[in-house]
Image (tube, rainbow, N blue to C red):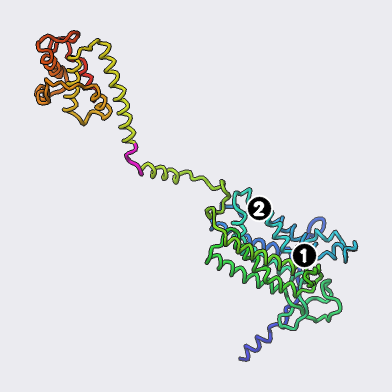
Amino acid sequence: MQSVLHAAAMIPASIPSPDWSGFDIPLPWGSLRIHAYALCILLGIVAGLWLTSVRWAKRGAPEGSVWDIAIWAIPFGIIGGRLYHVVSSPDAYFGPGFDGTGDLSLIPQLQRGGLGIWGAVLLGAVGAWIGCRKAGVKLSAFLDAAAPGLLLAQAIGRWGNYFNQELFGGPTTLPWGLQIDADNPNFPPGMAADTLFHPTFLYESLWNLAGVGILLLLDRRFSFRRGRLFCLYAVYYTLGRVWIEAMRIDDAEQINLFGITTRLNVWTSIFVLLGALAAFIILGLRKRTEPDTVYLPGREPSEVGPAADAEADANSDADPDADTAAHAEKETDADADVKPAAAVDRDASGDTDDEAETARADAGEDAAIKQPATVPAAASAHSGAVQHADSAVSDSESRDNLPDNQSGPGRASAPAEASKESTGGTKPATGAPAAGVPGHPGAGTAPEAEGTK
């Protein structure tokens, strides 16, 4: 028990003022001062970018695009933050009441401290928009991915105020009260040298760290998109900034609204909080009209390589009979072209006698009966249109007259006998060669009927 009490007694009753605020790098023409404030800002930027890059990659963003956006957002953010600080605390730069007694050369001296978060967010978003357009991604998607990282960067960067001994709160007797060197320019005049102050930098740092965890949990649970997580960031941060800002006693621009006079940053935080809350609700009520993707329309990566080949194979396998159907269609068209050619040959030979024509039609019918599976449908329909049934020749007689082998000159015997019965004698029709005569083929269209099966 005594050891516990001894350890508690060793705990300082206040936060001591920093003994170190930076270091010097010797150079041939002098030295380069590296301020602790700048190191805290840089460390916060690195940590915020790391968390953002991890979240950005998980959302399917193009590799390395977070750095392409950061090179635009960071410079814009620093310039915007400095300009907002100058406007919100103008006395040091323009003099009280803008009487011209200030020092304008202090404006670019960032190492002295003074970056307004809302100016940094506003111009930083402009820079991020430029980077997003060049990378082909949506600004809203990037802001959602960057929201927790932005809070992390602010939590670390706030420690720069501690090393600069600035932006502290009013006097306090709490054990975590902050010591400020009495000879520091920021020490309030007229107060005792041992006065302790509220460490508002620590309050805001802890508030932001808690916000990082809250945003990550909410995003994991609800998967906020279209800028809604960034709206929650603004709501959370300004909610804490209102009461933290109200505790500060440093010089700041005072604004009177609705009969209340308070710091400009307090009013800014209130308006941003209300605007962000309204935007979060409105975005939640709107229905999604486009797929959830980080890419701008028309900038999505094209599907090439093995994935595209696999998709083409899948489409081909989905209809395996497509090639067979196309091949059958070509054969049908070819048969349709061959059939009129036979008619042209018939007309050229002068064979217009009814008996010869009837014999050729019967021969074509017999060929179709013998091998119907090999005759294309289009050809069968065409031959049926010109075929004349002969009442003197029955189907049974035609089948009896067909030889076993249907190739060669033997197919001409059936048309010859049919012609003999139709004419009532053995004399062939005029213009038609006699069947079975050596050196002379049978009916003219019998070989053609074989060739168009």
Q: Please say if 15 is above or below 335.
A: below
> Is 179 above or below relative to 123?
below
Q: Secondary structure at mark 2?
A: helix
How far apart, in angstroms, are the residues tagged by discs 2 and 1?
25 Å
Instruction: Examine the rendering and report whether any part of residue 44 can be seen.
Output: yes
User: In this view of the protein, which residue sits in the foreground, 396 or 242?
Assistant: 396
Image spot of residue 274 (x, y percent): 67, 66
Does residue 230 appear to the left or right of 344 in the view shown? Answer: right
Q: Are marks 2 and 1 in contact (CB under 8 Å)?
A: no
**Between 359 and 263, the one nearer to me in the picture:** 359
Kindly identify the amino acid type of the residue bearing the numbered disc 2.
Answer: Trp
Which stretch did the figure color magenta? 318-322
Instruction: Assign the C terminus to one quadrant of the image.
Output: top left
Could you tell which of marks 2 and 1 lies nearer the N-terminus?
Answer: 1
> The residue under label 1 is which amino acid type?
Gly
Q: Check disc 1 and report the residue beneath it.
A: 114
Point out the residue furthest to the bottom here: 2
What kind of secondary structure does the magenta stretch mostly adopt? loop
**Residue at 21% over, 22% down:** 387
Q: Position of residue 18 (x, y in %)?
A: 75, 73
Q: Nearer the viewer, residue 179 or 325?
A: 325
Q: Tell me the residue at 74%/72% (across/down).
A: 245
- Dot 1: element: loop
Residue at 16 percent of width and 19 percent of height = 408
Residue 161 appears at what percent x and percent y?
74, 69
Mark 2 crowd level (few <14, some 14–19, many ≥20, 10 Å Cα): many
Q: Quadrant of residue 24 in the image?
A: bottom right
Q: Label 2 belongs to which residue?
A: 129
Percent x, y for residue 183? 84, 74
In terms of depth relative to the viewer, which is nearer, 172 or 353? 353
